[in-house]
Amino acid sequence: MQEYDFLTTRLRRLRYNPRVRRLAQSVTLDPAKLILPLFVRTGKNQRVPIASMPGNWQLSIDELVKELAQIRDLGIGGVMLFGVPEHKDAIGSDVMSDDGIIAQAIRASKDAVGDDLLIISDVCFCEYTDHGHCGVLKNRGVGPNAPIDVDNDATLTNLVKQTLVQARAGVDMVAPSGMIDGMIGAIRQGFDENGFEHLPIMSYAAKYASAFYGPFRDAAESAPSFGDRRTYQMDPAADPGQALREVELDIEEGADMVMVKPALAYLDIVRLVNDTFPGVPLAAYNVSGEFSMVKAAALNGWIDEKRVVLESLTGITRAGASIIITYWAKDVAAWL
Ligand code: PBG
């Protein structure tokens, strides 16, 4: 056989023995760093399947509480609650009420699991408004292509009301997702003035106007009834530096953790944010469309769900996210 004198470094030596491979790893997945999104609705004994997200349901509070016990036992870090209210209106009153679905769900959750599982609320208005936009609408303009004008500062006032309701209900952390300018500062100020200076905020800091949210909008019944979210969520083609400006502002305004969303088509942003702001815990949201695509292929027998999911979450972690919000949290915790 030919001798190859140059071949002194053989990287395959790191791969023959599974234990050596394990030693060479630096990316590990941990159930405690996963957050599971859950949808909560009114009623009793309700477990309404979400057609576009097999294995996910809208749960009534009694069913939610049963789920939480399982989730805690799996060692998952936390859940992120989304409310589906009985009644929607122009400003999303339900989520600003101490008797609204999300306030009730938070109280029941804390009663059920105490400090053994983090109860996080997604802070937004789109699930609670009849028009499905993420705040108070200013004016629709004229014509089908008129830009959607969410009244930024009026929405800030309501975001403060919403988060104070959630704080009083006992939430462990709030996660504002509306991409409203100043939302973190307004919520931080509201908390600090009302005795909640200890409550952390995880900001959906770089959230893009993405088609990957399609199945979620079924799940939360929150699709905009007209227009889209491009006047407040980020443009996928925007310079990546704009994501850094969003993150920087949110940190200055008091965000304790930040998020990039979606995850898989935005791994460059995850990497950039983590490199630029080391030390700020970074979450990535593996969103509904990313879930449903893999689920559909898996249900057809076209891919190996477990391997594809673990590989995807490994990629998100390798890109720099230390927290992952994923609809697979229970499966992953069981697989690990
Ligand atoms: C807004 C919100 C959305 C998602 C999380 N929070 C929807 C949107 O911005 O349209 C999407 C999550 C997913 O697709 O899994 N409340």
Image: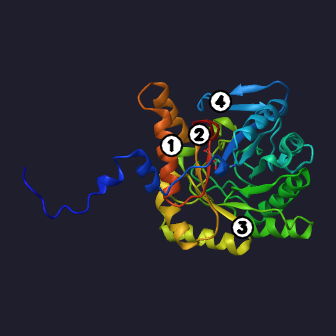
Q: How far apart are marks 2 and 4 (CA)?
A: 20 Å
Identify the residue at image location x=84%, y=52%.
171
Residue at mark 4: 50
Residue 280 versus residue 21: which sits nearer the camera? Answer: 21
Residue 121 screen position, x and y as percent: 77, 50
Q: Tell me if mark 2 has few (under 14), some (14-19) or many (20+) residues whose alpha carbon lies within 10 angstroms of its own.
A: many
Report the side of 332 relative to 202 (left or right): left
Residue at mark 2: 332
In the image, residue 236 sits, relative to residue 218, either above or below, namely: below
Residue 6 versus residue 138: which sits nearer the camera? Answer: 6
Report the side of 24 relative to 245 (left or right): left
Residue 60 screen position, x and y as percent: 81, 31
Residue type highlighted by circle 3 = Ala
Residue type highlighted by circle 4 = Ile
Identify the residue at image location x=64%, y=37%.
330
Circles 1, 2 touching at the beta carbon (< 8 Å):
yes
Circles 4, 1 touching at the beta carbon (< 8 Å):
no
Residue at mark 3: 255
